């Protein structure tokens, strides 16, 4: 049996993969399969392994980085009592559909699509709820603990790992689009997997342009839209500087935090599998954060639109009102929003929301 690769070895492999990325989806698929690959020496290998088929989403296919690393994931899975076989997909929507149909009992998905299986973790991308990586790190650490295990299961499904893929920033073709009231009438890319989009579009008066993750960025580069959302990791491989020229910029205030999540049908797995995976996912989050922050630092300073404190307050107020409305509509999970608010107030107790009568 092959020995598992060390964390240092994986960090080097991640860096090599990022140099050759051609689509931001690669980071999504790569991150979620790296999460549990670190071997748990304390877990004993068993002779009675549970056979599981996993739908593996990799934009490249069977020869892509996700599949290569998933071969190492098998080692850890065997220590937790599971023998994995893979079915390959280059489209996350189709992977999710086959997972729903019972073709597989495990799948890697962008967090916004994983919401279909867990309302709580699906609310991690609530608009404006997690304003910094300090907040996100604390939240992910909390969710990986055994005390949070009850929130990881919803019906037949369990989230067994969560990883950050970067803050989603607003990329605009005109730097003057820098406050909530200036969004009206502007064309913005909208993904079919984001159920809150319709409400947010109505509130701002923007014009939605239906898109996929890939062609959303292509539309921005051709100036077919005024605004799109993307993590910094997409800037170089998707050549977003083309869309930013000559007068564009990146609003330096996150719309939300993007993640990748591993979803399983927990009844098909041995007891304890999910917690083993979540515990070890923490080993990788610092590596992902290093990659994300390096990507942000490498974007030329001239593109960042710095937001004054009073404008941040306006964005925060707008985002908070939208979160409350979407919570009441059942799109965002109330308990998740409460956790995020507690973390915001722990980091900055002076926020007005910390003493508001209408707390999240």
Image (cartoon, rainbow, N blue to C red):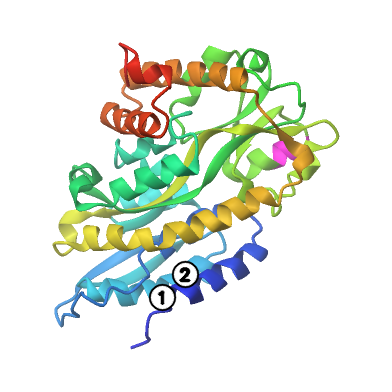
Residue found 60% across the figure and 36% down from its top: 169
Return the residue at label 1.
Answer: 71
Residue found 15% across the figure and 56% down from its top: 267
Q: Is residue 67 visible?
A: yes
Q: Residue 194 carries which label?
A: none
Q: Is residue 234 visible?
A: no
Q: Are marks 2 and 1 in contact (CB under 8 Å)?
A: yes
Q: Is residue 346 left or right of residue 296?
A: left
Residue found 47% across the figure and 18% down from its top: 199
Q: Looking at the figure, which quarter contains the C terminus?
A: top left
Q: How far apart are marks 2 and 1 (CA)?
A: 6 Å
Residue 176 lies in the magenta-colored region: no
Residue 300 x, y percent position in the rendering: 76, 46
Return the residue at label 2.
Answer: 67
In terms of depth relative to the viewer, which is nearer, 106 or 319?
319
Name the image quarter holding residue 268: bottom left
Residue 221 lies in the magenta-colored region: yes
Q: In this view, does 79 lie to the left or right of 23?
A: left
In terms of depth relative to the viewer, which is nearer, 2 or 314?
314
Q: Badge 2: how crowded within 10 Å, few (<14), some, or many (20+)?
A: many
Q: Can you say whether 344 is above or below 69 in the image?
A: above
Name the image quarter holding residue 354: top left
Residues shaded magenta: 218-222
As drawn, which residue projects farthest toward the bottom?
1
Q: Looking at the figure, which quarter contains the N terminus?
A: bottom left
Residue 341 x, y percent position in the rendering: 35, 28
């Amino acid at each position: 049996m092959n020995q598992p690769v060390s964390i240092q070895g994986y960090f080097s492999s991640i860096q090599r993969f990022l140099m050759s990325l051609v689509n931001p989806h690669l980071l999504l698929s790569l991150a979620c399969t790296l999460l549990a690959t670190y071997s748990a020496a304390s877990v004993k290998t068993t002779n009675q392994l549970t056979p599981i088929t996993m739908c593996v989403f990799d934009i490249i296919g069977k020869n892509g980085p996700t599949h290569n690393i998933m071969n190492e994931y098998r080692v850890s899975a065997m220590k937790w009592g599971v023998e994995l076989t893979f079915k390959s997909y280059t489209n996350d929507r189709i992977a999710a559909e086959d997972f729903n149909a019972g073709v597989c009992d495990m799948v890697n998905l962008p967090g916004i699509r994983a919401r279909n299986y867990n309302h709580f973790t699906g609310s991690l991308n609530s608009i404006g709820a997690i304003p910094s990586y300090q907040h996100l790190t604390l939240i992910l650490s909390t969710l990986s603990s055994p005390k949070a295990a009850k929130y990881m299961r919803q019906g037949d499904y369990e989230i067994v790992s969560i990883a950050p893929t970067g803050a989603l920033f607003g990329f605009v073709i005109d730097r003057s689009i820098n406050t909530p009231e200036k969004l009206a009438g502007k064309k913005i890319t909208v993904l079919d997997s984001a159920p809150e989009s319709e409400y947010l579009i109505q509130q701002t008066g923007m014009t939605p342009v239906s898109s996929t993750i890939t062609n959303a960025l292509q539309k921005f580069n051709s100036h077919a839209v005024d605004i799109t959302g993307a993590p910094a990791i997409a800037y170089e491989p998707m050549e977003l500087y083309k869309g930013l020229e000559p007068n564009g910029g990146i609003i330096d205030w996150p719309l939300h935090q993007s993640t990748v999540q591993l979803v399983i049908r927990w009844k098909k797995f041995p007891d304890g599998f999910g917690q083993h995976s979540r515990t070890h996912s923490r080993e990788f989050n610092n590596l992902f954060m290093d990659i994300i922050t390096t990507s942000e630092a490498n974007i030329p300073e001239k593109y960042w639109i710095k937001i004054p404190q009073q404008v941040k307050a306006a964005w925060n107020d707008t985002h908070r009102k939208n979160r409350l409305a979407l919570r009441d509509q059942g799109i965002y999970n109330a308990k998740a929003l409460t956790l995020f608010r507690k973390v915001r107030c722990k980091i900055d107790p002076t926020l007005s929301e910390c003493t508001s009568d209408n707390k999240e």
